[in-house]
Amino acid sequence: MTTPMSAERFADRFRFYSGQPQQLRGVLQLYAAIGSSDQGAAILDEQAPWAVTYSEQPSQPPTPTGGLDPRGSEEAGMAGPQMAAPVQAGDTYLLVNDRDEDMEAYDHTGAFLWKIPCLARGQGADTDWSHTNTDTPPGLYKLGKLYADYEQNPNPPCSDTAMGYGWYSFDMEELEGQEVAVGRAGIMLHGGGSACGWPGAWAPQQPLHPTLGCVRLHNADLRDKVLPLYRQGTVYVGVFQEKKCRRARPQGDAPLGSHPWPTPTCSTGWSSSAAAPSPRPASASSNPSRRKRPAVSSAAWSSKPVNRSWRTLMWWRPAVAPAAAPCSTRACAAPPMTLLGCRPSLTGSIPTATTGRSSTSPRSTPACTIRRRAR
């Protein structure tokens, strides 16, 4: 019984083994098979449409000077990269907005390519990325080493690696020192999800659950969306997270409580009573059309049943503090409170191995708790 090969699997034979001896043998065998068919002469003609298209050198639009930074009004007031990506022809930029739970792709000219569901979320508060297992630290990364587990075995047995990482996983190399600055290390882009169980974690459109600090996509999107970009050039990843709000101290030298508490201010530098900062103006390295597209609600992602309700499961009592005007940032929408405990642990949803990708920094702690097998 024959197994028909999909177009993606056929293309993988040429992309994955590019320039290797087995690819040359495969091309010669394919040539012989085509030549022996009834339509072989027409297919192998020098002027065949596929041969002409394959021989053309496509024109490349100019690369924007000063690097690429495609952030728009959706990322206003969020913590993100401090530098533009030094893209070249063939490179791409993946913009991850954890508040909107999506990833957008742009080519090296800043042209929009696609948008898919994505999480850059760990355990804990929405505005915490400075502790072990919390959200992905915001900043600029680039994709490093690839672990193509799906290509080694499309139907593997159950294992911690297959459940935790899914079909494909990529090392994310920090470009701004954002991991080391908060004692983090081992951030990756991957699929899977131990909370999905088995074989749910290996499904093409598995539910997206929070990680221990990595960026998570659907397994099929890693193969069909990210992998082709990775194999054509450098892939930069800009991660954006919500900022914390801080409550200002009372003014003057009078005893605490004699002055009213001022309006809480966010770390963006503007108060809730002032106007929000204007969107970043369009430039040669941005995509103005992105701001004209209507916002995509979470209901549009029919395949990502992300449940955030466990974040609010805390024991608390109101703090003894004067009332304050509400802050416009989502992280400060709740009334003042004093935490008396932490959220219930997700027992059984995360593998318990404690080794991760090695790091030379003594302060570094692994973001994912499953050891990548040696390759």
Image (cartoon, grey):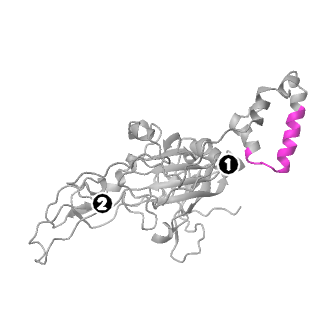
The count of marks equals 2
**Which residues are drawn in magenta?**
15-32
Report if residue 98 is visible in the image.
yes
Q: Measured from the top left, where is residue 314 in percent x and y?
A: 30, 60
Camera-nearest residue between 311 and 70: 70
Q: Residue furthest left?
A: 258
Q: Residues within 10 Å of mark 2 (few under 14, many from 20)?
A: few
Query: Marks 2 and 1: which is nearer the front?
Result: 1
> Where 368 sits versus 364, above or below?
above
Residue type at mark 1?
Arg
> Where 152 sits versus 353, above or below?
above
Q: Secondary structure at mark 2?
A: loop
Task: Please give left or right for residue 72 compared with residue 317 in the image.
Answer: right
Report if residue 1 is visible in the image.
no
Q: Measured from the top left, where is residue 41 in percent x and y?
A: 88, 24
Of mark 2 and mark 1, the one earlier in the sequence is 1
Task: Please give left or right for residue 278 compared with residue 68 in the image.
Answer: left
Camera-nearest residue between 83 and 174: 83
Q: Main secondary structure of the magenta part?
A: helix
Identity of the residue drawn at 87% across and 44% down: 25
Q: CA distance from mark 2 to mark 1?
A: 44 Å
Residue type at mark 2?
Met
Q: Secondary structure at mark 1?
A: loop
Task: Please give left or right for residue 302 compared with residue 247 in the image.
Answer: right
Mark 2, residue position: 314
Mark 1, residue position: 231
Q: Measured from the top left, where is residue 151 in percent x and y?
A: 70, 47
Where does the C terminus fall, quadrant-wise?
A: bottom right
Identity of the residue drawn at 55% across and 75% down: 361
